[in-house]
Image (spheres, rainbow, N blue to C red):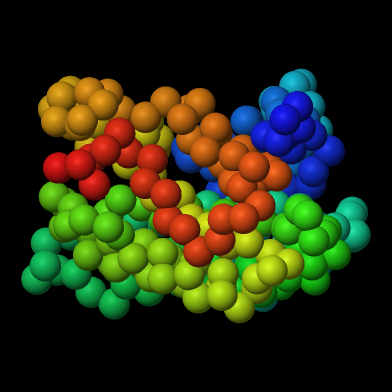
Amino acid sequence: MSDLFSIEGKTALVTGGSRGIGLMIATGFVEAGARVVISSRKADVCEEVAASLSEHGECTAIPADLSREDECRRLLDEVGATTDRLDVLVNNAGATWGAPLAEFDDAAWDRTLDLNVKGVFHTTKFALPLLQAAASDDDPARVINIGSIDGIHVPMLETYSYSASKAAVHQLTRHLAAKLAPRVTVNAIAPGPFESKMMKATLDAAGDQIAASAPMKRIGRPDDMAGTAIFLASRAASYLTGTVIPVDGGIATCK
């Protein structure tokens, strides 16, 4: 049992790893002994975060705009130049958009779907050779997609493209899981409210109400997210694929 939940020595790529949910996961991975590559669109922020995380383990940065297929390819080419295997891919990079229904235009859909759905697909596609190289019969390689409880229940806010994109991520997770088994598992985490830049305005306005209405009576903490991702990346989760795990204090499934 001593190594059942261990990810020590594994190589992981965390997209959107410079802030929010991605940073929570990247931090947990680094502190658990994984070699971590983070990617985000802003090069200076990405490098700064990687330098900070390197004080606790091994972390490097490769900036990329994953709303573009060519950038997804370049990212994985650069990862492949430094390693011949990738044990874990965390598809976390994402965007949201909120506007009244009458004002919700093509830009609101394109920006969100290009990154949240197409970016997940293309990044996984280009990562596949490295993932397959890391896989074994006892310990498959892992893809962990970050969905949302907004893809499970109807959100309060008018974020139509975001909720649709996250529901698409959940279904894409199942589809890829069926295709890539048994060498690669594909699972999704559906976060609820966590402290992040994306959630800041909502939590500033209604954080206490959200916490009070949750069955667990609080919002998520970084360890909640890191722990779930570490579990999915470890040998303990080697028989799970195609799952969507709500990490939301029961908001989407107990109310």
Q: Quadrant of the N terminus?
A: top right
Q: Is residue 161 visible?
A: yes
| 117 and 133: which is toward the camera | 133
Residue farthest to the front, as pictured: 1
Q: Quadrant of the C terminus?
A: top left
Q: Is residue 125 above or below residue 152?
A: below
Q: Is residue 108 above or below residue 151?
A: below
Q: Is residue 194 above or below residue 190?
A: above
Q: Find residue 112 and report its horizontal and vertical position in percent.
A: 38, 65
| 88 and 18: which is toward the camera | 88
- Residue 113: quarter of image: bottom left
Q: Find residue 131 and report its horizontal and vertical position in percent.
A: 76, 63
Q: Is residue 43 visible?
A: no
Left or right: 92 with respect to 83?
Answer: left
Q: Is residue 243 above or below residue 33?
A: below
Report the residue at 29% width, 77% height from top: 106
Left or right: 109 with respect to 126?
Answer: left
Report the residue at 89% width, 54% height from top: 82
Q: Find residue 66 and report its horizontal and vertical position in percent.
A: 58, 64
- Residue 250: quarter of image: top left
